[in-house]
Image: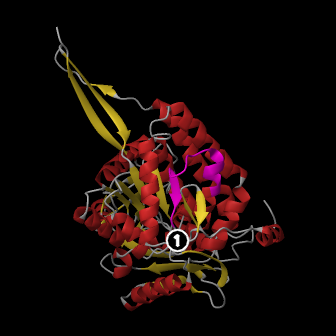
Amino acid sequence: MKLKSDWLELQQSLNIEGRAYINGEFTEAICGERLAVINPATDDIITDIARCQSDDVELAVGCARHAFKQGEWSDSAPSYRKAVLNKFADLIDAHNDELALLETLDTGKPIAHSVSTDIPGAANALRWYAEAIDKVYGEVAPTEKDVHAFISHQAIGVVAAVVPWNFPLWIACWKLGPALAAGNSIILKPSEKSSLTAIFLGKLASEAGLPNGVFQVLTGFGHEVGDALSRHQDIDCITFTGSTRVAGQLMIASGETNLKRVWAEAGGKNANIVFEDCGDLDRAAAETAGGCFYNQGEVCVAATRLLVHESIKDEFVEKVIAAAKNFQPKDPLDPSSSMGALIDQEHKAKVLSYVELGIDAGATLRCGGDVDGQGAFVEPVILDNVDNKMRVAQEEIFGPVLCVIPFSTEQQAIDIANDSQYGLGAALWSDNINRVHRVAKKLQAGSVWVNNYNEGDMTVPFGGFKMSGNGRDKSLHAMEKFTETKTTWIRLQP
């Protein structure tokens, strides 16, 4: 691992690109406007980026549609797409340090996480789908003897990927991988708060050999670029990760225009249940803290509701408080930092306002809160004796705030866990195999972890129930989002 001085030296040498990437070239927004990029750890301006709007969307969509119809990518042999995507992934690995530094400067996350997890994870996502391209087959239906009916999957067309600021490159590649593997043209719209690594991908895409128009990046505000994409008649699919509110807006826009597919991974208020028969409370406490405070709590599947049996609550909460000390905010460029800054000062104020709401509603502040001084830093917060009806237990805070909710019976734990508009993730800790299976089956969540929190890899799907969204990222199931299923029915002549 590099020293802090090494990262600072690399920062001085970075030539940061801030233009949009359209049809194989970096270009300014047509309106000529730009947006400032703020380092949330220092409140300093890093650079600025193009403020794309509807005219840029028109241009990019036209290029994407032309590339799709031209067929150099969409009609290419799977082996060709596989080779290009593998090279794309290799180039991300080759530029790991620059991408990691850009991610940390842009989002405030610890450089140790960016360099070891986020950027390698992005490369791995592309590589996984590259290897999947020639392993996804069609089907032959069991029909009468004089019929040959087969089911095939073909690229859907032009895809818009709208991604959030918490894991900008990693989540982008969860979507780029299957969409490009299937043969689509894709327009990536990063958050205006975290666009630098997405822009960097433009250079790597050209070097990897992606044809012009197949991959493009539009930077700017969601209410300008994102809305224009969602309402464009020539966009066939939008894949989105972000808030439940915006997910709903995208679905409305689809319904009012061309019924484009909308795949949304939205919010979460995830329950982490610790039963009295958990055999390793120390490990459970460590993973409870990590599950809530990793990435500054800016994780849609963060374990923000701790449901703990009343007989062990006091003991267990003390263990979690001790484990939370491993996530004290520190300069993100310090390699020893395990917790950086929140995305910006506005979000910091929102997170702290929720802490006050919880206290006012009767919760007990056990630790954490504001960090005075420069940067959007907040210490891990634990609110004890929370009632699940409180706003802090029902609304997604998207910050390092853990709500402790006691329960007395297994059924009560299940009821509390499911008493949420969300259903993204859940976990339970127990050494009773019967309880494990009983409870896991009843939890309304897309992912359920047993005696761990948020483990997984590219082989398993990720997404939620209820208002946490639809569709799935990761695994072969994600390929289904970016293809049309076609039946071809042939009557055989005697």
Instruction: Assess whether residue 434 is covered by the magenta stretch.
Output: no
User: Residue 62: x percent and y percent?
Assistant: 42, 57
Numbered label tally: 1
User: Residue 411: x percent and y percent?
Assistant: 27, 60
Q: What residue appears at the point 60 percent right and 57 percent down from the top-left corner?
A: 202
Check the picture and name the quadrant holding the N terminus.
Answer: bottom right
Magenta-drawn segment: 203-218
Check the picture and name the quadrant holding the C terminus.
Answer: top left
* Colour treatment of the image: secondary structure
Secondary structure of residue under mark 1: helix
Residue nearer the viewer, 101 or 208: 208
The reply, left or right, for residue 260 in relation to residue 32 is left
Q: What residue appears at the point 16 percent right and 17 percent down from the top-left corner?
A: 144
Residue nearer the viewer, 234 or 98: 234
Which residue is labeled 1 in the image? 297
Three-letter residue code for mark 1 = Gly
User: Residue 239: x percent and y percent?
Assistant: 40, 57
Q: Visible in this render: residue 267?
A: no
User: Residue 374: x percent and y percent?
Assistant: 66, 88
> Which residue is situated farthest in the top direction here?
494
Q: Visible in this render: residue 438?
A: yes
